[in-house]
Image (cartoon, rainbow, N blue to C red):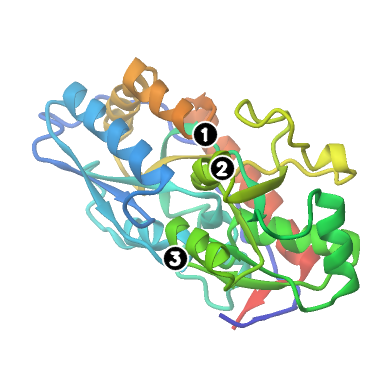
Amino acid sequence: MPIRRRSLLLAPLASPLAAPAIAQSGFPNRPIRMLVPWLPGGSSDVHLRVLSELAGQKLGQPVVVENKPGASGTLGALTMAQETRGDGHMVGQIPITVFRLPAMSRRPTFDPAKDFSWILHLTGYVFGVVVRADQPWKTWGEFTAYAKANPGKVTYGTPGVGSTLHITMERIGEMLGIEWLHVPFRGGADNIQAVLSGQTVANSDSTGWAPLVQEGKLRLLVVWTAERAKRFPDVPTLREVGIDIVADSPFGLGAPKGIDPGVVRVLHDAFKEALFEPKHVETLDRFDMPLRYMNSEDYAAFAMKTYAEESAIIRKLGLRMD
């Protein structure tokens, strides 16, 4: 998808969620759709399937996962924004790209400040950059020195245009004076296969690469968390290599706008219980995902703050999709 540089105006922001009210009688009275905007099998998909199973037990109705990959993880949000019923029987992941792509588009298809109800915040990711283990670069410094000396020769794969991986790699390139080439993929498996086959030089993604790093097929050069990753204590953070960036792409669950606040409360309570269940916590640990709960009101405020911040970054980088 082509990108050109141009300044953008920030959309007006909405007020936080209204005070809770009495939930609609009998909610939920049918299965709830859980929109997962990624291909099956990735860390987000597996985690949300476990969460949905547990939440369904609390709600007395199944929470059925529906994968909607594409558009850098925003097709689920688009589906919710187009939903007119708003009765609580549709929820979905709100990845951070939901706050970016409207600022990157000439004609946004949804407005984060107006089109969603905010259920609760969940977690984030451990991101990192890996290369094939037989590549000559042993450290992040060696890799970036090569990239700087060879403009346009280093390709890196991410889950898509406007993703945290894409935006952060472009920020790093701007800071270090590196011209490298972005290759977007629809899912983590394709991204990993590309770096293993040599289609791309580097892979920037969440810890789907971890088993291959542990097997010695890939080399992890740097992680983007505030602290070193538990599974890879010898790998430095971006801050430790002189780049003052922490990027972990926090996300939560949203729903279409206009849902009765009492229904929001029912959804919040069920998913909060599921979030802290041992089975779900074990799943988060498996993918190095920290538990970062926020209630509906706090998540709404966080979402508006994130929208403003991410839009400002897009303006600064001048990224715009045609």
Is residue 23 visible in the rendered structure shown here? no
Task: Give neighbour class at mark 2: few <14, some 14-19, many 20+ (Cα, 10 Å).
Answer: many
Q: Is residue 111 above or below residue 320?
A: above
**Residue 96: % across, % down:** 55, 50
Q: Which residue is mark 3?
A: 186
Disc 2 secondary structure class = helix
Could you say which is closer to the camera, residue 282 or residue 7?
282
Mark 1 or 3: in front is: 3
Position of 281 compared to 90: left or right? right
Mark 2 or 3: in front is: 3
Quadrant, the C terminus:
bottom right
Q: Label 2 sits on what residue type?
A: Ala
Position of 59 compared to 282: left or right? left
Position of 17 compared to 264: left or right? right
Look at 55% across and 37% down and name the residue there.
124
Q: Are marks 1 and 2 in contact (CB under 8 Å)?
A: yes
Q: Which residue is mark 1?
A: 299
Could you say which quadrant of the image residue 186 lies in?
bottom left
Quadrant, the N terminus:
bottom right
Task: Give neighbour class at mark 1: few <14, some 14-19, many 20+ (Cα, 10 Å).
Answer: many
Task: Give neighbour class at mark 3: few <14, some 14-19, many 20+ (Cα, 10 Å).
Answer: some
Q: Is residue 86 above or below residue 161?
A: above
Q: Earlier in the sequence, mark 1 or mark 3?
A: 3
Q: Which mark is residue 303?
A: 2
**Residue 134: % across, % down:** 67, 58
Disc 3 secondary structure class = loop
Could you say which is closer to the camera, residue 247 or residue 218?
218
Disc 1 secondary structure class = helix
Give the Cα distance between marks 1 and 2.
6 Å
